[in-house]
Amino acid sequence: MPDQLSPQNLFKTGLILFVFFSPFSIAGSQIGLGIAILGWLLKFFSQKKFFWEKSFWDKPILLYLGAYIISILFSYNVKASIAAFSNEWLLLMFFLLVNNLDDHKFSRKLLDILILVSVVVAFYAIYQHYTGFDLLNQRLPEEYNLLGTTKWRSTANFSIPLTYGFHAMIVSLVCFCLASFEEDKKKKMLYYLASLILVTANLFTYTRSTQIAQVFAFIIFFIFSPKTNKKTEIALLVFYFIFIYFVDPDIYSRYQPLIKAEKISAMDLRWIVWTTSLRIFLANPITGIGFGNFQHFYQRYLQEPSQIFGHAHNDFLNVAVNAGIIGLSAFLWMWFVVIKFFKKRYQKQKNLNVKPLLLSGLVCVFSFLLASQFQCYYTDAEDNMLLFFIIGLAVASDKYLIKTKT
């Protein structure tokens, strides 16, 4: 087999395509992921050996998938649940990286490509916020116009602001973690600048879930970050948030209805979604209704006029409704285990090249956990792939370092 078509080269080429397309094209990123997986499969055939190294996440993910299969067996519509199960193939991203990525320089190259392209897209998102311009349709949908202003909720190249907001949030957090440990002053400043540009793009999506999660994640970051940079970084962020408020105070306008609401039920349409979802769960508490059936049951259990939704607007409630207590327990365990791993390895790790990647993984998981209380980000392929990429990259780098020492 020619060197350029070797399994490892296919794997690396696929990952480069994935990070390049991830900020603006789900089709391109999934093609890249598919090529990388093809390289992994060819590795099996060419060397006639099954390459699968054990990881801390093997059993939790298997338990979650097992709970998913149980929910299929008791599903209201088995065919719909099987079709929904096919989306879990994106979990392969984690195992792909852990079993094949053994080059730290290449890992950093992947992150730098991801950051560079994400920053370019962020500039477009910022421009879009003030103009409403959209490359595909010339104009953003009117629903994304902020009433009474000439500003728009940015979507970049994604279909909805929430999807792009999550992407910008995750990459901005990775940038900040890399900057905190970077010894080269020029690179450090570039990472900080890239992070703030991406935070701005996230803010301009006017997505409350990712805005709140962004702030929360920075707090988690400061709990674990190096003491040497902490005061400077806090001052930088405080100055930034004050500055951005004066530049564009409308950012905080979407919180006003929540503050002024006299009762929780009047705050948001999500309250209707959550209460309806809870009624579905209480009626089917053990194995759930089966993934792919939410919309049918939502219409049945809805008690007030409302638009129809296809998920619970909360990842954990969504799993509870679709897979019951069994699925929710497995899903919670999966995230508890990954937080425990990152916290333990970050505190033990001394290598300053790997340490920021572990911190990135920890902070990004926390940001996902908070943002997912208000939206289903796990079921969003663009966001799911990016999250598992960051987790897998960090675990692979840490694992490779341990192997080289032994």
Image (cartoon, helix red, strand yellow):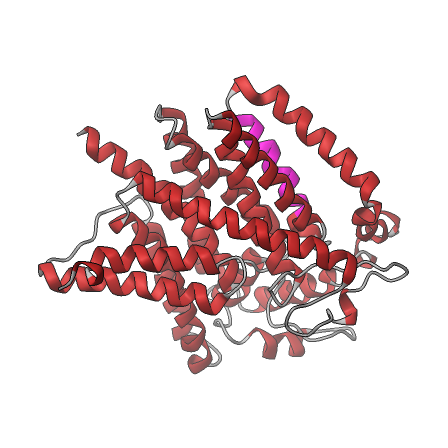
* Quarter occupied by the C terminus: top left
**Mainly helix, strand or loop, the magenta region?**
helix
Q: Residue at x 60, y 35 (%)?
A: 218
Q: Residue furthest right?
A: 148
Q: Which residues are magenta?
A: 211-224
Query: Residue 188, position in %: x, y?
Result: 52, 30
Query: Residue 335, position in %: x, y?
Result: 45, 47
Q: Is residue 52 left or right of residue 248?
A: left
Above or below: residue 184 compared with residue 270 = above
Residue 287 showing in the rendered view = yes
Q: Residue at x 81, y 58 (%)?
A: 151
Q: Residue furthest left?
A: 48
**Magenta region includes residue 221:** yes
Query: Residue 405, position in %: x, y?
Result: 20, 28
Q: Is residue 119 left or right of residue 107?
A: right
**Total residue callouts:** 0
Q: Is residue 209 left or right of residue 183?
A: right
* Quarter occupied by the N terminus: bottom left
Q: Quadrant of residue 17?
A: bottom left
Q: Is residue 57 left or right of residue 22?
A: left
Q: Residue at x 11, y 62 (%)?
A: 46
Query: Residue 397, position in %: x, y?
Result: 32, 39
Above or below: residue 394 compared with residue 181 = below
Q: Nearer the viewer, residue 270 or 320?
A: 270
Q: Nearer the viewer, residue 231 or 110?
A: 110
**Magenta region includes residue 281:** no
Q: Nearer the viewer, residue 88 or 151?
A: 151
